[in-house]
Image (cartoon, helix red, strand yellow):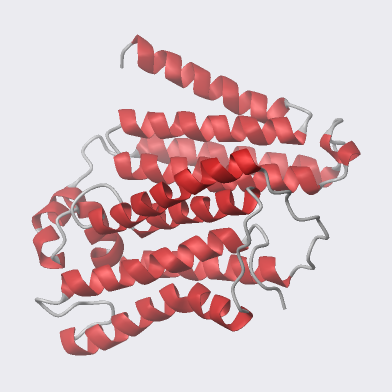
Amino acid sequence: MNAADLLLVALLVAVAASALAVRDLRAGAILFVFFGLLLAVVWVRLAAPDVALAEAAIGAGVTGALLIDAAAQLHPRASTGRVPLRPAVLLSGALCLLLAIALAAALIALPTNPGEASALAVQRVAESEVAHPVTAVLLAFRAYDTLLEIGVLLVAVVAAQALPPIGTAPAARDPVLARVVGLTVPLAVLVGVYLLWAGATRTGGAFQAGAVLAGAALLARFSGLAFTLPPARLRLLLAAGLLVFIGVGIAAGLAAGAVLAYPPGFAGGLILAIETALTVSIALSLVALFGLGARR
């Protein structure tokens, strides 16, 4: 660890503390975005570009935008002032502190040598017919985890869509912003498709591609461009990733002898099909969390 890394760690802690201590909710949300970007740099320094890209796109970008949007919808007086120290607040803070201590203890207790799991994954990555070990782990060796993550995301979208709509006026069309978006959105779509295709051999994949495509759609929304889908088609596309994942897992599993296993010679194509469907569902799910699309 050099001086630059020490400065990065100190800045990360300072920004995190500021985001928790600031009174203005919008300022706290902006500091959260800054914290996420710094954390992405930390992951790059730790030689984990996949995690860094996911943090920048989803952790800082999408989640930060959700927090800023939520802060903007709150009553102006709710965005300032101290939070009263009620028992529920104290209990939540105590539980968060205990969780942080438990995570720190688990991290310290980890062995210096990661063991045989990493070496075994690298040795058997060829069986997944994808060259990138992260994609192999997410969609072949531990596909159940990814399947459940998509299910949780879909449940979150269903819960968000069940809420009553917020009566906000549509964004005014700004000609300068519209021109910028006209240049940026096609580039973002191209980057999203590249990340999807590159996931088999290098950093990328469905989550990163879906986040970039969702960002493109949100840019279009903020510039005043219309973005609507018929309710039936929206629901089908939202569930497409999970349905394709389950369908491929069962159908391929019948041929391979185990659920979520892939027959030899078909693994690469099936994983690409799953990731394509997941990209569409993830992008629409993130967009739907902002209130785009039809509500029942």
In percent of width and height, residue 141 lies at 24, 65
Query: What residue is drawn where x is 58% and y is 20%?
Result: 14
Query: What residue is drawn where x is 51% and y is 44%?
Result: 59
Quadrant of the image containing the N terminus: top left
Q: Is 186 rendered above or below residue 99?
A: below
Residue 69 in the figure: left or right of residue 184: right
**Quadrant position of residue 200:** bottom left
Name the one closer to the observer, 190 or 289: 190
**Quadrant position of residue 159:** bottom right
Residue 58 visible: no
Name the one closer to the observer, 167 or 107: 167
Residue 52 in the figure: left or right of residue 201: right
Query: What residue is drawn where x is 73% and y is 51%?
Result: 171
Outermost residue on the top side: it is 3
Quadrant of the image containing the C terminus: bottom right
* Figure label count: 0
Residue 267 visible: yes
In percent of width and height, residue 32 lies at 60, 34
Query: What residue is drawn where x is 56% and y is 48%?
Result: 219
In percent of width and height, residue 114 lies at 23, 42
Residue 4 in the figure: left or right of residue 23: left
Residue 271 in the figure: left or right of residue 287: left
Name the one closer to the observer, 58 or 118: 58
In percent of width and height, residue 150 lies at 46, 67
